[in-house]
Image: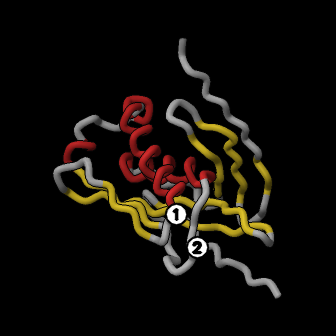
Amino acid sequence: EYTKDKYQGNEYAGVVTGLAWTAVGGEILFVETSLSKGKGSKLTLTGNLGDVMKESAMLALEYIHAHASQFDIPEDLFESWNVHIHVPEGAIPKDGPSAGITMVTSLVSAFTQRKVKSNLAMTGEITSVSYTHLRAHETPEHLVCRLLLEKKKKK
């Protein structure tokens, strides 16, 4: 017997739909980033995340901080706002590197207050210098928009 995850859409800046691999195929998960006034440099992670997902979240924040100008994010925002990344359904353990691009997108959305298209879900690992193997799927129509992006390091 299979159960379907209910697709809720992304109605707020900072909320992004990710795709997760499971033994029976996959599921969607939401990554929610919120900002709160503070001294900055504080990252809170909630939602029963494993070590690899925690590392992806830290790397995602460092990546957008290092590339803030490319995303039109004022540098001073990092000094005056604390970041909270939450992946709902905390009772279910979540781990693996493929949520990296979803976390970057969620963070950029929160810092710029630009919403992500509600019918877009993504999976893909990031590194400190590039996005790798980004795959985006349009939902609920399940139109596959495989985007293989390689951002090359500038020489």
Q: Nearer the viewer, mark 2 or mark 1?
A: 1
Q: CA distance from mark 2 to mark 1?
A: 24 Å
Task: Please identify the residue farthest to the bottom as the structure is shown.
Answer: 1
Q: Is residue 46 above or below residue 36?
A: below
Q: Quadrant of residue 70?
A: top left
> What residue is drawn where x is 68% and y is 34%?
149
Asked if residue 128 lies left or right of residue 79, the reply is right
Of the pair 63 and 8, the residue shown nearer to us: 63
Q: Where is mark 2, residue-wise?
A: 8
Counting residues from the start of the chain, the first of labels 2 and 1 encountered is 2
Q: Position of residue 31 (x, y in %)?
A: 50, 62
Element carrying mark 1: loop
Query: Is 3 on the left-hand or right-hand side of 49?
Result: right
Q: Quadrant of residue 143?
A: bottom right
67 in relation to 83, above or below: above
For disc 1, the marked residue is 50
Quadrant of image for the C terminus: top right
Q: Amino acid at mark 1?
A: Gly
Q: Residues within 10 Å of mark 2 (few under 14, many from 20)?
A: few
**How many other residues sit within 10 Å of disc 1, few (<14), some (14-19) or many (≥20)?**
few
Residue 140, quarter of the rendered image? bottom right
- The residue sitting at 59% across, 37% down in the picture is 131
Q: Residue furthest top?
A: 155
Residue at 41%, 68% (x, y): give it: 46
